[in-house]
Amino acid sequence: MRFDIVTMALRLPALLLALTFHEFAHAWMANRLGDPTPRRMGRLTLEPWAHLDPIGTLLIVFYGFGWAKPVPTNPYFYRVDPRRGLLWTALAGPVANLLLAFLFALLIVFGLRWGLLAGVPYLPRLIMVTFQLNVVLAVFNLIPIPPLDGSKVLAGLLPGRQAHLLDRLEQIGPFLLLIVLLSGVGAGVVFALSGTVMEAILRLADGLSRLIRPF
């Protein structure tokens, strides 16, 4: 995403929406699976300030990568196998962002096709930035390095011994992630994959829009 003052300002509401739904989805899934911890900690809410981490939020605005406050969960409350429950709880966040991205892709496609966004200053850019940010956030969180969601998803899919080895990376995971990102390789992969996902979502939205005619 190109960085300038306007884009930075537009990222703020987009960021609030993306991070809030991401963390709410984690809390909702954990609660759905029987863990009351997120609800008791006040995280089962769409109130943005309950989820934002000040430093992580600023890093996303200025750098493109950051974090929100992790949702506390206790897998021993899950009504399913704890590893399976952690998988679904972790996956819920990125899925929520992809669903939001699809909704904004529909706004993009319908707006262009029917001229709904004409004459509204900055609204098309806000919709585009929100679409892009949700896709990047989903793809970034699916990197299988602790403490990102992708590591928990992968641990839930691996056999017990391999999953345990992945869990042991939890302590050095943030350092590994930092190295990957600062090397430029991680950022390049994330943005390349994000571009592919954006194109696929826009194609899907365009196909759906062709089935719907305006009144």
Image: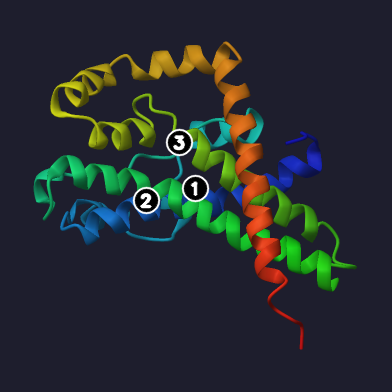
Label 2 is placed on what type of residue? Ala
| Residue under the point 86% across and 71% down | 115
Q: Is residue 35 above or below residue 135?
A: below
Determine which residue is flagged by label 3.
141
Q: Badges 3 and 1: C-beta atoms under 8 Å apart?
A: no
| Residue under the point 22% across and 23% down | 167
x and y percentages locating residue 73 in the rendered image: 22, 45
Q: Which disc, if any, is residue 19?
A: 1
Alpha carbon distance from label 2 to label 3: 11 Å
Label 3 is placed on what type of residue? Asn
The quadrant in which residue 144 appears is top left
x and y percentages locating residue 14 in the rendered image: 62, 51
Secondary structure under the numbered disc 1 in the rendered image: helix
What is the crowding at mark 2: few (fewer than 14 residues within 10 Å), some, or many (at least 20)? many
Q: Is residue 40 left or right of residue 42?
A: left
What is the crowding at mark 3: few (fewer than 14 residues within 10 Å), some, or many (at least 20)? many
What is the crowding at mark 1: few (fewer than 14 residues within 10 Å), some, or many (at least 20)? many
Alpha carbon distance from label 3 to label 1: 11 Å
Q: Is residue 163 above or below residue 120?
A: above
Alpha carbon distance from label 1 to label 2: 12 Å
Q: Which disc, if any, is residue 92?
A: 2
- Which quadrant, please, contains the N terminus? top right
x and y percentages locating residue 96 in the rendered image: 45, 54
x and y percentages locating residue 198 in the rendered image: 65, 46
Mark 3 or 1, nearer chain start? 1
The quadrant in which residue 159 appears is top left
Label 1 is placed on what type of residue? Leu
Viewer-proximal residue, 57 or 188?
188
Q: Residue furthest right?
A: 119
